[in-house]
Amino acid sequence: MEREKRKLDHIEFALKTGQQHNSGLEDISFIHQSLPEISLNNVTLTAEIGELELSSPIFINAMTGGGGAETEKLNGDLAIAARETGIAMAVGSQMAAIKEPAQQASFKVVRQENPDGVLIGNLGGEATVDQAKRASDMIEANALQIHINTIQELTMPEGDRDFAGTLSRIEKINSSIGIPVIVKEVGFGMSKETVRQLLSVGVSIIDVGGFGGTNFAKIENERRAKVLGYFNEWGIPTAASIVEAVKVSPELSVIGSGGIRNSLEITKSLALGAKGVGLAGHFLKVHKELGLEQLIKEITYIHEDLKIIMTALGCRDIQELRKSKMVISGATYHWLTQRGFDCSAYAR
């Protein structure tokens, strides 16, 4: 019951603390194209993330599960929204269901509601190969996220304190389970150094999970008697983290996530080089405040707006969008310049 309560607390405090709204994407500006020379009808949103072939570059990112009937209902609704809009969906950490079999229903519901969809399982970096296979089988997963969340765990009163061997465990899972593995940060971003480490053990898909969205340090600090306030502003903003990851290797599929809320921010993330974009906090807020039907409409509107923006930029598909010209300014420019990246290349 303690784990179940923590899962429900996470949803409550995620809605309470909200999103940071400082992902760095506000520092990205597209160069206007007066003569795009394309038709809206010719724009396609199909995407490839590693081995996954998707009808849309956006997906519902990991949120929850393992919190009893409430999280079962939420995951069921999210799966219906994914089914009705043709997008992929990731579940929250399945360790709860591995340790407490009674919680499996809150995850299995996603495959029941979306039997033909692309579903992504989820476990933490402490997981073993056997646990990874059990998590994948639980929802008949098309891919598996391994989330790394050191800052959240350190801030969590009952969280992990030993992170030794994480890279080795990821390597073993990646080479053993037979489906694509996505390594995902949880709101604090990935540096180019971290991405190189993951690439060195065979990981080919990473989700930067940048700073600027749901802040799990703040969430865990809500649950602490002694607040670790120094972690509340800790992390690499999403825009900078996407660039750090993309520039490591063309072999990588990079997913942008962390405070992304609308079609313009999705477009900017893709133009920076991400091959897909995950949204969690925004979709959770829409669902909680307006319900399932409005969530389905919101995803539909995002798809429509993506095509409109791509038409304005003269981009027929995601590959062309990645070649868009843009100007990087503000804090993101200073971050990337000090880290050795040539921001002017994006404008040229």
Image (tube, helix red, strand yellow):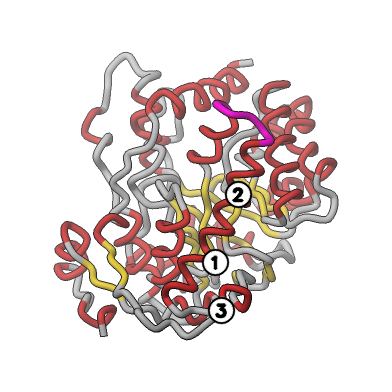
The amino acid on which the numbered mark 3 sits, given as a three-letter code, is Ser
> The magenta stretch spans which residues?
288-293
Please report the residue visible at 73 percent of the width from the left and 57 percent of the height from the top: 118
Numbered circle sitting on residue 299:
2
Nearer the observer, 147 or 254 = 254
**Residue 33 in picture, x, y percent from top left:** 35, 79
Numbered circle sitting on residue 112:
none
Q: Is residue 27 magenta?
A: no
Bin the neighbour count of mark 2 within 10 Å (Cα to Cα): few under 14, some 14-19, many 20 and up. many
Please report the residue visible at 49 percent of the width from the left and 58 percent of the height from the top: 207
Q: Nearer the viewer, mark 3 or mark 2?
A: 3
Residue at the spot of label 1:
307
Q: Nearer the viewer, mark 3 or mark 1?
A: 3
C-alpha separation, residue under disc 2 versus residue under disc 1:
13 Å
The disc, 3 or 2, on the residue closer to the chain's N-terminal end is 3
Q: Nearer the viewer, mark 2 or mark 1?
A: 1
Looking at the image, residue 50 sits to the left or right of residue 37; the answer is right
**Residue 49 in picture, x, y percent from top left:** 60, 69
Tell me the chief SS of the magenta region. helix
